[in-house]
Image: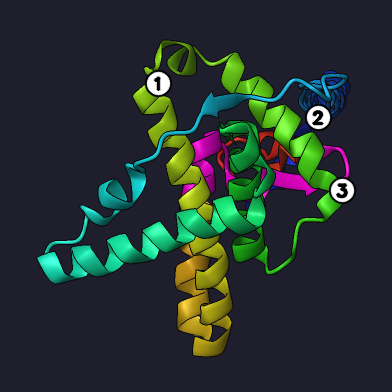
């Protein structure tokens, strides 16, 4: 039987291991602090775009369905979801003639976290989350280069899919384990697509969004 490799560590090796663990913990704290600081103090700094009359996202999202009847049916569903977002979730934006992109991104993250874990994101976390995601977007070159039409489409997709995932999660609970697993996979994919991180490492709390970084701290090859 092979000896446990840990038993052969020299004092120098053990020091390296302790140091590496300490660095990892500091990295986690630093990343969390940086995320919490995003947009902090900018309570009035919202990321808004001018609202357009004719939405694009419902037709774009429905285009992935192969046959025409399914496309028409899903386009109607997506149109309803976008209208619900604007009329129920964010009714105050209509009076200003704008769409708040940071708020849509926060709602998207919150609803997908709910669908993934079955736990509602507290209302107190929404505003910090809006600030974080708005700040992230403003700093993103792709957002800076995007045309007004591209920005509008991106907002509409976030708003539409946030409502869609809320309803899908509710329906899945009534349909059983297979449906719940399907919705969880979709939610995880959406979060990864938006944020580029493992959704299992994502936390949303009173200070907004943070990362656990457990995957990054795991032993190499584990």
Dot 1, crowdedness within 10 Å: few (<14), some or many (≥20)?
few
Q: Locate the C terminus by quadrant.
A: top right
Query: Which segment did they paint magenta?
Result: 190-209
Residue 199 magenta-drawn?
Answer: yes
Q: Is residue 7 visible?
A: no
Q: CA distance from mark 1 to mark 3?
A: 31 Å
Q: CA distance from mark 1 to mark 2?
A: 32 Å
Residue at coordinates 59% horizontally, 55% vertically from top-left?
87
**Mark drawn on residue 109:** none
Badge 1 element: helix
Q: Is residue 180 left or right of residue 77?
A: right
**Mark drawn on residue 32:** 2
Q: Which residue is mark 1?
A: 148
For marks 1 and 2, give the one nearer the viewer: 1
Q: Is residue 129 left or right of residue 159?
A: right
Residue 32 lies in what quarter of the image? top right
């Amino acid at each position: 039987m092979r000896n446990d490799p840990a038993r052969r560590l020299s004092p120098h090796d053990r020091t390296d291991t302790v140091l590496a663990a300490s660095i990892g913990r500091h990295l986690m704290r630093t990343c969390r602090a940086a995320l919490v600081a995003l947009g902090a103090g900018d309570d009035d700094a919202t990321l808004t775009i001018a609202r357009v009359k004719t939405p694009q996202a419902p037709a774009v999202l429905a285009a992935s369905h192969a046959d025409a009847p399914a496309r028409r049916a899903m386009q109607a569903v997506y149109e309803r979801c976008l209208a619900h977002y604007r009329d129920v979730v964010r009714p105050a934006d209509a009076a200003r003639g704008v769409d708040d992109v940071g708020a849509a991104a926060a709602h998207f993250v919150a609803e997908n976290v709910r669908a993934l874990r079955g736990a509602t994101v507290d209302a107190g976390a929404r505003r910090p989350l809006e600030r974080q995601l708005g700040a992230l977007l403003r700093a993103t070159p792709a957002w800076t280069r995007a045309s007004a039409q591209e920005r509008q489409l991106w907002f509409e997709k976030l708003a539409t899919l946030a409502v869609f995932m809320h309803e899908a999660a509710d329906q899945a609970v009534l349909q059983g384990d297979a449906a719940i697993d399907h919705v969880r996979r979709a939610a995880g994919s959406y979060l990864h697509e938006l944020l580029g991180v493992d959704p299992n490492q994502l936390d949303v709390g009173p200070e907004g969004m943070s990362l656990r970084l457990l995957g990054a701290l795991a032993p190499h090859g584990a």
